Amino acid sequence: MAQVEARGTDTDPLVAGPVDPWAMRKAMLSEFWFYFSQNKGAVIGLCVFAVIVVVAIFAPVFAPHGPTVQNREALLLPPFWQSGGSGAFPLGTDAVGRDILSRLIYGARFSLFIGIFVVTLSVSSGVLIGLTAGYFRGWIDTAIMRVMDVILAFPSLLLALVLVAILGPGLINAMIAIALILQPHFVRLTRASVLSEREREYVVSSRVAGAGVLRLMFITILPNCLAPLIVQATLAFSSAILDAAALGFLGMGAQPPTPEWGTMLAEAREFILRAWWVVTFPGLAILITVLAINLMGDGLRDALDPKLKRS
C-alpha cells in the first residue's frame, strides 16, 4: 500500500471521519510504554535514574552538609556503621573533613549537567553534519566521512586528553572535548539513516510536489531517523559521564574542590588502603548511574526499533 502523507488536515485519507491528534499521540505513548515496560531492567534503570535526577535537583535539601565545608575535627572519619564513625557523616569524610555523602549528592548535579551538555552538543552538530553528508552525497559526503574516520581512528580517551591539553584543564573544556569525540557516532548514524530514507516514495513525492531542500531534510527525512538517534544519545549520556570522570581522575577535567565524582576519586588515590570509603562510594555512584542509563538505553531500543517489537 502506498504511503500517503496528509498535511494541513485533521482527517486520515484511509479512515472515514476526523482523526484526533491527541488520541493518536496517546496511543503512540501507550505503545511505547508497553514495549519499554517489557524490559524489566529498563524499568529499574528508569526508576534509579529518576531518583538520581530528584536528588540532584534538590541537593541542598538532601545533603546534610555543604559540599566544600571542611570539618577539621573529623578527618578521614569512617562510615557510621564502622567503628569510629558518626551519624553526622553517614558515609564518612575525606582527608580534609568534607562529608562524602554531601559531595556525592552535589556531584550528581555535575554528572547530569555533563551528560546533558555533551549529548546536546554532539547530537545537534552530529545530526546536522550527518544530514548534510547523507542528503547531498558526492564530494561533500566523502570529505565529511573521511574527517570522521580520522577522529574515530584515535582512542577516544587519548584524543580527549589531547584536546583538553590544547584547550586547558577544566570542566567546560573537558565537556567540549568529549562532545567532539562522540560526534562522529551521530554523524555516521544520521548519514546511514538518511541514505536509507532519501529515495523512499514519500520523499520523492515531496520533492516532486516542490518541497525545498531544507524542508526535505528537516521536516520530511529527519523525523524518520530519530529512533536510532535517541537510543544512541542515551548511550552517549553514560559515555560522557564515564569520560568526564576519567578526565577528572587524570586531573584534566573538573578541578578541586569541585564535587565531581572523577575528581573525588583522584583526590582519594593516596588513601585507598587506609580509607576505603573515600574511593568506594564515588566509584559506586559512577557505576550505578552509568548502569541505570545503559539499561534505559536497552529499553528504548526495544521500544523504538520495530524489528525488536514482539507481537
Image (spheres, helix red, strand yellow):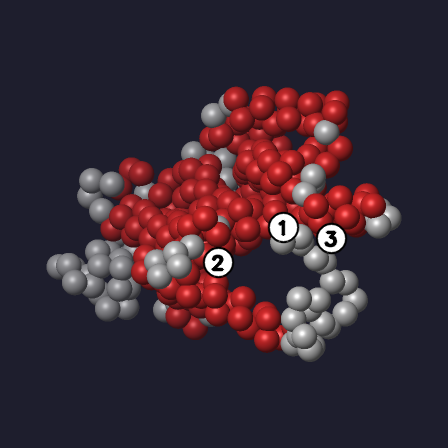
Tag 3 near tag 1, CB within 8 Å: no
228 in relation to 53, above or below: above
Give amino acid for label 3. Answer: Ile
Q: Position of residue 168 (x, y in %)?
A: 59, 33
Residue 109 placement, left or right of 269 = right
Mark before the other along the chain sequence, 3 or 2: 2
Q: CA distance from mark 3 to mark 1?
A: 9 Å
The front one of 171 and 233 is 233
Residue placed under numbered mark 2 in the picture: 109
Q: Position of residue 7 (x, y in %)?
A: 77, 63
Q: Quadrant of residue 122?
A: top right
Placement of the N terminus among the 4 image quadrants: bottom right
Q: Position of residue 201 (x, y in %)?
A: 70, 46
Residue 278 placement, left or right of 206 = left
Does residue 14 show up?
A: yes
Residue at image coords 75%, 44%: 204
Residue placed under numbered mark 3 in the picture: 219
Give amino acid for label 1. Answer: Asn
Q: Position of residue 304 (x, y in %)?
A: 49, 54
The front one of 186 and 307 is 307
Mark 1 crowd level (few <14, some 14–19, many ≥20, 10 Å Cα): few
Q: CA distance from mark 1 to mark 2?
A: 33 Å
Tag 1, which secondary structure?
helix
Residue at image coords 26%, 58%: 92
Give amino acid for label 2. Answer: Arg
265 in relation to 39, above or below: above
The front one of 128 and 285 is 128
Tag 2, which secondary structure?
helix
Q: CA distance from mark 3 to mark 2?
A: 34 Å
**Which residue is situated farthest in the right direction here?**
210
Residue placed under numbered mark 1 in the picture: 224
